[in-house]
Image: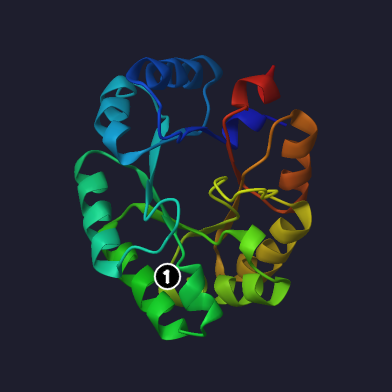
Amino acid sequence: MELNKYIEHTLLKQDAKKSEIINLLDEAKNFNFFGVCVNPSFVKLAKQYLKDTNIKVVTVVGFPLGQTTCESKVLETIDAVKNGADEIDMVLNCGKLKDGEYDYIVNEISAIKTACQNKKLKVILETDLLTKDEIKTACELCIKGGADFVKTSTGFVKNGVGAKAEDVKLMYETVHAAGLGVKASGGIRDKEAALKMVEAGAVRLGTSSGVKICE
């Protein structure tokens, strides 16, 4: 199995320096990863640096809390696409989900998908904060909103586990028939963990340990 083709090589730390991002991009080139995932301020740099490759530039919106307004997430998305982002990973508003404001969530996903133009949209559910029923409901709302992927985690929840194979399997079983993919992200630090996620149904892996996994 070519795990490099599943990996979105990730660096989203708030203190990430330009030199670290360039190192990430060089590693992505060396291992021919599917993509890189960087914060919005580095999208333009990443797109320029990877211009002669097929490596996708992925960025985040409403990150990491998901509690910004729909309007601000839409503006972030428009800006990211303008700067060269190939895919957008937005954070679901977990509070709205828990309050049962399902129309809000569907409308927000739909608005951001429109702002993506023809770019793929992934919705980060933050599974560490959700029950199994809430994960399933969130996936169903992502289908209704027109998302392309559901994603487990930001990796920023304090004491959170991140991606769990059982959650990935539940997400896969909920969205697969509707044509959505699953991205496992958070806590995937070795080849064994990566393989478990793929076996559970993930077609993308968000990890900062891509080099270790592939070596």
Q: Residue at x 60, y 37 (%)?
A: 6
Q: Residue at x 49, y 22 (%)?
A: 28
Question: Can you say whether 115 is above or below 137 in the image?
Answer: above
Q: Measured from the top left, where is residue 26 in percent x and y?
A: 44, 15
Could you tell me the amino acid type at mark 1? Gly
Q: Measured from the top left, where is residue 41 in percent x and y?
A: 27, 35
Q: Measured from the top left, where is residue 199 in percent x and y?
A: 77, 47
Q: Quarter holding the N terminus?
A: top right
Q: Residue at x 64, y 70 (%)?
A: 135
Q: Residue at x 52, y 22 (%)?
A: 32
Please, which residue is most extreme toward the front here? 158
Q: Measured from the top left, where is residue 155 in percent x and y?
A: 57, 45
Residue under label 1, please give it: 146
Q: Nearer the viewer, residue 17 or 170?
A: 17
Q: Is 197 placed left or right of 125 in the picture? A: right
User: How many numbered badges does the structure rendering display?
Assistant: 1
Q: Quarter holding the C terminus?
A: top right
Q: Rate crowding at label 1 as few (under 14), some (14 to 19) or many (20 or more) other CA atoms within 10 Å.
A: many
Q: Nearer the viewer, residue 124 or 202?
A: 124
Q: Is 198 placed left or right of 157 in the picture? A: right
